[in-house]
Image (cartoon, coloured by chain):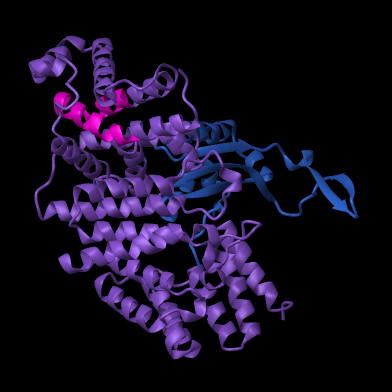
Chain colours: A blue, B purple
């Protein structure tokens, strides 16, 4: 049965900046190829690319008071850079799709099922 | 004249009932399933806008056939290779096929056979499961692509692409629009039932508030199973599946609480169960039991019937349920059946015996590590008076499930047992 998965793309800025222009363009070209592939297979749900986390704000509500601070200033080298949401037949297929994303050859893609509203009777 | 709410529902039912029959007529006449299916979809859309405003024509099916045939001709004309194809259509069209048939011109048996042939085509094993379900809902169920997309929470272009790929796959694999002979027919019918059951389960959502615009897949699946039953009245498994769906659906009002949380079977307010379905479901199975070999859907319906017979959870005849699970284990062994059987074992022979069955499932390649094992383990540990271990099992299950209502249920179960150790 089809399950929805989020294919989360991790980015390593140091690594990405060390690439040549050609290598970087190959990554962009890879995304341009991947998109129509999952659209025409009827597996595409949505996608988003995120700007650098230096633009992030972290929001907290404490005792009813909202505060928004810059950051998080992440310690890790890799951060979430974007995602593809897909609806596919199996986890194996989701992994196959993740492997087609060019960033899989550079950093890593995290594949996680999306929670659904339905549940069988217990 | 403009249709009221009831009138609209009547028109919708009329369109959906006619969808497979009209498509059957067209495919028989013109052969190309893919293009005929598009043409019927357009005719249905035209009817859904025109009929509420101008009234339902005297012979709705003939109207739909005429409009769909005209759309098909338009498509063929606009095609680049129109000349060659027009010749083909003309050659394939019997002279009287160019005029709309008289109201009772179409023998009912032929139409009915077409519905089943269509179902078998849409559920053909060359297609992946999700495509089988989508194509069935569109070509046989008469739902629009937009409605199917909403039902499965995917964007409309995605669903359109899935359906169009499925139709291409049918075309390229050379699958024909014809009724297979036995024994293939019986095997293929099992696939149809499986797809309809999947559609039913997909629609069997725990919440209703967030998805008011979602077409009711449960209703659609039951409608299609009823159609199959009209065509195969003596097939025990078709009756069994319908009964299973009726009995499951009967519990719908009781299975979620006021905040949309799941209410397990033993805690449900049984006065909320639909008494008509509770009465008719078992009768349906009983009527077919003497007529042939017993199959897995009949046994599952029988299990649901035993639950339904108990007016209180404590009155449940677990010994009978266990013997039915034993039978199901022989007929259609699968890990989910084994898991449910573990519950029955616990209810008859005590939680310790049930937990032993669960341990044997932990290493199962298919179900080992499944959150339901831990969920059941939690229940049985709770029953045997081990709240700390039960809490751990519920927490593990909650981490693994991908269902929102199940997770809420498991977390609340765990929380009931006190703070984390």
Magenta region includes residue B25: yes
User: What is the span of residues highlighted in magenta in the rendered image?
Assistant: B16-40
Q: Position of residue A7 (x, y in %)?
A: 54, 47
**Picture quadrant of residue A39:** top left
Say above or below: A49 vs B209.
above
Magenta stretch: helix, strand or loop mostly: helix
Q: Image height check: is B109 above or below B281?
A: above
Name the residue located 42 percent from the left edge and 55 percent from the top edge: B201
Residue drawn at x 14%, y 36% as measured from the top left: B110
> Where is residue A30 drawn, in percent x and y?
49, 35
Residue under the point 49% across and 38% down: B150
Q: In the image, is A44 to the left or to the right of B382?
A: left
Asked if the magenta segment contains residue A80, the reply would be no
Q: Quadrant of residue B141?
A: top left
> Observer-nearest residue: A22 or B179?
B179
Q: Is residue B369 above or below residue B86?
A: below
x, y percentage for residue B58? 28, 21
């Amino acid at each position: 049965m089809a399950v929805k998965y989020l294919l989360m793309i991790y980015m390593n800025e140091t690594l990405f900046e060390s690439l040549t222009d050609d290598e970087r363009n190959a990554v962009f070209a890879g995304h341009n190829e991947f998109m129509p592939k999952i659209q025409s297979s009827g597996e595409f749900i949505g996608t988003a690319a995120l700007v650098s986390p230096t633009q992030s704000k972290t929001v907290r509500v404490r005792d009813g008071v909202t505060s928004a601070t810059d950051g998080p200033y992440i310690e890790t080298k890799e951060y979430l850079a974007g995602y593809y949401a897909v609806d596919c037949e199996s986890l194996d297929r989701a992994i196959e799709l993740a492997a087609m994303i060019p960033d899989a050859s550079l950093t890593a893609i995290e594949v996680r099922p999306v929670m659904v509203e339905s549940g069988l009777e217990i | 004249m403009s249709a009221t709410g009831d009138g609209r529902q009547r028109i919708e039912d009329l369109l959906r009932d006619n969808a497979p029959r009209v498509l059957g007529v067209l495919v028989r006449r013109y052969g190309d399933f893919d293009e005929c299916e598009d043409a019927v979809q357009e005719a249905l859309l035209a009817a859904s806008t025109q009929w509420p405003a101008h009234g339902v024509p005297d012979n709705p099916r003939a109207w739909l056939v005429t409009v769909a045939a005209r759309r098909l001709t338009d498509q063929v004309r606009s095609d680049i290779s129109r000349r060659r194809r027009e010749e083909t259509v003309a050659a394939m069209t019997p002279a009287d096929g160019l005029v709309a048939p008289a109201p009772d011109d179409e023998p009912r048996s032929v139409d009915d056979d077409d519905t089943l042939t269509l179902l078998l085509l849409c559920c053909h094993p060359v297609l992946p499961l999700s495509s089988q379900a989508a194509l069935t809902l569109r070509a046989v169920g008469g739902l629009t692509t937009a409605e199917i997309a909403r039902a499965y929470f995917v964007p409309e272009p995605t669903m359109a692409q899935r359906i169009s790929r499925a139709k291409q796959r049918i075309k390229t694999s050379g699958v024909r629009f014809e009724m297979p002979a036995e024994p293939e027919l019986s095997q293929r019918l099992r696939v149809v039932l499986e797809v309809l059951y999947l559609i039913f389960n997909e629609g069997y959502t725990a919440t209703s508030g967030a998805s008011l615009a979602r077409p009711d897949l449960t209703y659609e699946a039951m409608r299609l199973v009823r159609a199959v039953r009209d065509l195969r009245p003596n097939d025990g498994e078709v009756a069994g599946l319908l009964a299973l769906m009726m009995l499951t659906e009967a519990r719908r009002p009781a299975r979620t609480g006021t905040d949309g949380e799941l209410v397990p079977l033993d805690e449900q307010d049984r006065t909320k169960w639909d008494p008509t379905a509770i009465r008719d479901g078992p009768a349906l199975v009983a009527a077919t039991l003497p007529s042939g070999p017993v199959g897995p859907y009949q046994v599952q319906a029988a299990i649901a019937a035993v639950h339904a017979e108990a007016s209180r959870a404590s009155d449940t005849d677990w010994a009978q349920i266990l013997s039915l699970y034993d039978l199901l284990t022989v007929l259609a062994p699968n890990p989910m059946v084994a898991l449910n059987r573990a519950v029955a074992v616990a209810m008859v022979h005590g939680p310790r015996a049930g937990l032993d069955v669960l341990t044997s499932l932990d290493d199962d390649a298919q179900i080992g590590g499944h959150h339901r094992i831990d969920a059941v383990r939690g229940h049985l540990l709770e029953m045997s008076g081990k709240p700390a271990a039960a809490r751990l099992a519920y927490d593990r299950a909650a981490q693994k499930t991908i269902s929102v209502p199940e997770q809420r249920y498991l977390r609340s179960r765990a929380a009931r047992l006190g703070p984390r150790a």
